[in-house]
Amino acid sequence: MSDNNNIQEITDHISLKDLILKIKDFWREVWRSKWWILLTIIIFVTISFLRVYFEKPSYKAQLTFMVDNDDGGGMNGLGSILGSFGLGGGPGKSNLDKILRLSQTRNISQTAFFNEMEVNGVKDYFANHIINYRVDQGEWVKKSPLFFWKKDSDLKNFRFSHDSISTFSILENQALKIIHKITVGSKTGLIQTSYEDNTGIMSIEASSFDPEISFHLTTELFKALSNYYLEKSVEKQYFTYNLIKNKKDSIEIELRANEYALAALRDSERNLFRSKDKLQEMRLEGKIRIGYAALAKSIENLELADFAVKNNTPFIQVIDEPIRPLAGIKSSYLNAIIISLVLGFIVALFFILARMIYKETMKE
């Protein structure tokens, strides 16, 4: 048993000694190849430097905002009054995830796509400006894996000629879906949206190689999103407001008609007092009294409905918006040089190690 232990110790000692010798041989080889290592590092640094030098600057446009859905304090009493008319109840706490999801929908983005605006001196639908940008980047019509024919070749020279989305052809719908996908419809799109959990501050950020495209993507999407969200947040209250307003208008029209009829009847009497005329006059006076009471109540209800619309309308506050000219952003020369130094050194060491293993294998 003791002999076996001694043999194991000798084997471990020999293995450790061989490992140390191998490491020493490796570092000798590294030192002998120091000029090759230096050359490799120089090549990597040069390539990295040139890549950054010729890199196109990207332009980021960020807009931050907050959405306040709070109905306000001290409104409980008034809220109960509104509730008696079926007008109470606000949207409650802002659902930030819902707002973000809305910003990624085609229904929102297409509102921005078909606004006419001037970009780089050309006035056109914003959708066409995006197409022109993708054409300049060589990314509008994608190549197939076979390389000898192109996918979506019908879209090569396509541009939108009208903004009636409901009447779009199949080709126009196809182009619209592509634009939506490359802007907000994917994680790699030109626009990214997010919010901070702690503060609830939301952000819309567009990044592209064209400052005008980045700027308008951010601002136009925000306009479309805020308008849609504000409209839908008070849609129910606004519907109730319109019903009450229409009722109030009809009461007022009927009241004015009865007033006119009473005035006409009195003018026609000419100091002649007939019983049937007096009866008709009394009836009209009764209708007018009822009309005034109904009109007063309708005006009161209309004021409450108007307050419900205003009280339930969320407040969207812009914190920071993009300002032109946007600054171009490029990769850091320092970071690129450091990464290329490390990468070049590792590649050189790997090559030296592989060469040593090859030589020893061939000797055996």
Image (cartoon, grey):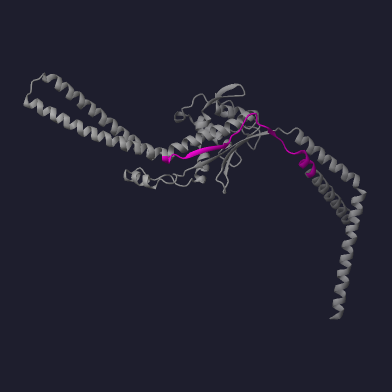
Query: Which is more toward the observer, 4 or 117?
Result: 117
Q: How many numbered marks appear?
A: 0
Residue at x 93%, y 49% (from the top left corner): 32
Query: Which is more toward the observer, 84 or 164?
Result: 84
Does any portion of residue 125 appear in the rendered image? yes
For residue 313, which quarter of the picture? top left
Query: Which is more toward the observer, 146 or 218?
Result: 218
Task: Give the quadrant of the C terminus.
Answer: bottom right
Q: Residue furthest left?
A: 275
Residue at x 49%, y 25% (from the top left corner): 162
**Could you tell me residue 289's position as x and y percent?**
20, 32
Query: Is 10 within the magenta?
Result: no
Q: Answer left or right for 311 relative to 249.
A: right
Query: Which is more toward the observer, 213 or 156?
Result: 213
Residue at x 49%, y 42% (from the top left corner): 68
Q: Answer left or right for 32 relative to 245.
A: right
**Could you tell me residue 363's position as x and y percent?**
91, 56
The residue stretch that appears in magenta: 311-338
Please tell me whether residue 95 is drawn above or below residue 173 in the rendered image.
below
Please tell me whether residue 337 is drawn above or below residue 140 in the rendered image.
below
Q: Residue furthest front?
A: 271
**Could you tell me residue 115's position as x and y percent?**
52, 27
Please tell me whether residue 326 is drawn above or below residue 187 in the rendered image.
above
